[in-house]
Amino acid sequence: MQLLRAETHGTTKVFFLSSAVWLVVGTVLGFVDATHLAAPEMLGNLPW
């Protein structure tokens, strides 16, 4: 599978796909950090 095919607006599609991935990653990490600030004991038993 070739990521950047010679199709119309291929670069734009990849840009929006990577933006959506980073949106999900940032949202999940933000939720984990907010949970850690609000209830630090909730994530205290997880090994790093």
Image (cartoon, helix red, strand yellow):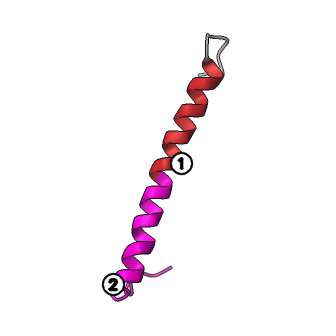
Q: Is residue 30 above or below residue 48?
A: above
Judge whether residue 41 is colored magenta.
yes
Amino acid identity at mark 1 = Trp
Q: Residue 40 in the image: x percent, y percent?
A: 38, 86
- Residue 44, by quadrant, is bottom left
Look at 45% across and 65% down and name the residue there: 30
Q: Where is residue 34 in the image (x, y as percent from the top left)?
A: 41, 73
Q: How crowded is mark 1: few (under 14 residues within 10 Å), some or many (20 or more)?
A: few
What's the residue at 51%, 79% (across, down)? 48
Note whether residue 3 is visible: no
Q: Give the Cα separation between the discs numbered 1 and 2.
A: 25 Å
Sequence-first tag of 1 and 2: 1
* Residue type at tag 2: Ala
- Circles 1 and 2: CB atoms closer than 8 Å: no
Residue at x 49% of width, y 48% of height: 23
Q: In this view, does 34 lie above or below 11?
A: below
Q: Give the range drawn in magenta.
A: 25-48
Identify residue for label 1: 22
| Image quarter in which the N terminus is found | top right
Q: Is mark 1 on a helix, strand or loop?
A: helix
Q: Is 17 placed left or right of 36 in the picture? A: right
Disc marking residue 39: 2
